[in-house]
Image (cartoon, grey):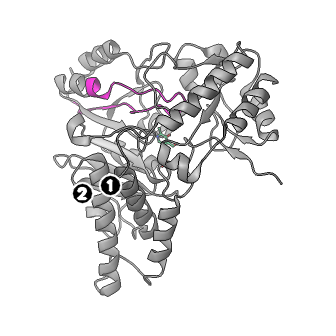
Amino acid sequence: MTKSIYLDYNATVPILAEVKKSLLECMDLGPVNASSVHYYGRTGKSIIQLARLNIANLINTKSENIIFTSSATEAINLLFGSFKEIIVSSIEHLAVLNSSKSDLFIPVDPSGVIDLNYLEKLLKEVSKGNQEILVSVMMVNNETGVIQPIKQVVDLTRKYGGLIHCDAAQALGKIKIDFEELGLDFLTISGHKIGAPTGIGALIFNNNFNLSPQILGGGQENGIRAGTENILGIRGFGEAASIMSKMPENNFSKVNFFKNYLYNKIRELRPDTIFFGQEAEKVCNTLLMALPNTPGDLALMKLDLENFSVSSGSACSSGKISKSHVVSAMGHNHLASNSIRISLPPNDFILETEGLITIEELDRLAECWSNI
Ligand code: PLP
C-alpha cells in the first residue's frame, strides 16, 4: 500500500527522532516512579525536573510554575475548575468551549481576529459583579492558523481586574511564546504538537493564584494534579522543548515557501477556492480552504483516496465531520461544512527532519484539489 502524504501537522506531529532516542534511554533506566524515595525515585524526580527546566526555558517562565497533565485539554479543565465567570472567544478549541460552559463570547471579524472592542464591552459589564473573571483567548487558531492579539487582550483584561488564560497548543513550535513578557496568568500547552508523544500537556500558572485540584490522590505536582507522573511523556516533552528552544529565530522560511507555493498553485488551478484568514497575521504552516458547493467530507475522502492525509477544519473526535464553528464565527456559515485544513510541519527543523515534502507532491495535491 502506498504511504499517504501527511499534511495534518496541526493535529499532531510525529515523535521526533531525538525524542524517540531519549525515550528509549529513559526506558532503560529501570522501574522509575518519581514518588519513591530510593535511587529509582530520585532518577524519576531528576527527569521531571530537567523537563520542567527545558519547557520553562522555551516559554520563559519559572520551572516551578509548570504542572504536568495528560493533555492540554486536561490542563484547561483543571484551570477552569477554579472559575465561575469565563469570557472566551467564539473560535476557541472545543477543549475551551466545552469545559468553560461559557455564554460570554468574543466575536471575530471575517478574517478570524477577535474583536477587542467587544471584549472591552463584555469586561465592562461582567466586572460590575463580584466574581473573579477569567478571559480565555487562544494564541493561534487550530483551523485557520490566525494569530490573536494576546498582548492587547492582557492589557484590556488587566484594566478591568480580570485574569488571563491563553491556550497556546497551536502556537508552541510555530511562534515565540514569552509567558513573562506577555504578562499572562495562565498558559496551556501540549507535547504532541512539537514532536513529543501524545498524552502529555501542561498548565503554566502565575504563582499568586491558588488552583483547585480536579484529581485528588497522592499529592503529585504540588498537590494540584495527583497521579503517578507520566515519566516517558514528561521526558519526551522536555526533550522536544529543548530541541525547539535551540532553533534559530527565523526557522520558518522553507515551510513558508512550500505553503505559498501550494496556495498559489491552487489559486491558479482552481480559482473558485475560498481561503480563510488569509488577510490576517498567520502562522506559516496552515491553509484553511473550501470549494463553494463541495462538502468537506467529500473533498477529504477524495484527497485521502489520492494518498493525501489532510483534515476537515471541523472534524470531531469520532472522525465525523461537523460544521466548523470557526468558519461560522467568521461569518461564512454557508461554507462551514466545506472547509479543509492543510497543515505543513510547524517549522523548518521539523520539515527537514520529519516531514520533508516535495514540489511534485504539492503539484499533485493542487491537481487533485482542482479535480474535485
Ligand atoms: N487547543 C488547541 C488550539 C488545539 O489545537 C488542541 C489540539 O488539537 C488542544 C487545545 C487540545 O490539546 P490536547 O490534544 O493536548 O488535548
**For numbered disc 1, what is the local secondary structure?**
helix
Q: Is residue 220 visible?
A: no
Looking at this view, is 128 or 151 the one in front? 151
Q: What residue would you read off at disc 1?
A: 55
Amino acid type indicated by mark 2: Ser
Image-quadrant location for residue 364:
top right
Circles 2 and 1: CB atoms closer than 8 Å:
yes
Look at the image and give the residue range highlighted in magenta.
131-153
Verify whether residue 278 appears in magenta. no
Predominant SS of the magenta segment: loop
Question: Which percent across, then down, holds residue 144?
Answer: 53, 27
Q: Is residue 175 visible?
A: yes
Image height of 145 relative to 238, above or below = above
Verify whether residue 151 appears in magenta. yes
The quadrant of the picture occupied by the C terminus is top right
- Residue shown at 45% from the left, 19% from the top: 280
- Residue shown at 59% from the left, 48% from the top: 355
- Residue shown at 25% from the left, 63% from the top: 222
**For numbered disc 2, what is the local secondary structure?**
helix
Image height of 96 relative to 295, above or below = below
Image height of 53 relative to 326, above or below = below
Q: What residue would you read off at disc 2?
A: 63
Question: Which percent across, then down, holds residue 1?
Answer: 83, 54
Amino acid type indicated by mark 1: Ile
Looking at this view, is 193 or 131 the one in front? 193
Image-quadrant location for residue 251:
top left
Q: Residues within 10 Å of mark 1 (few under 14, many from 20)?
A: many
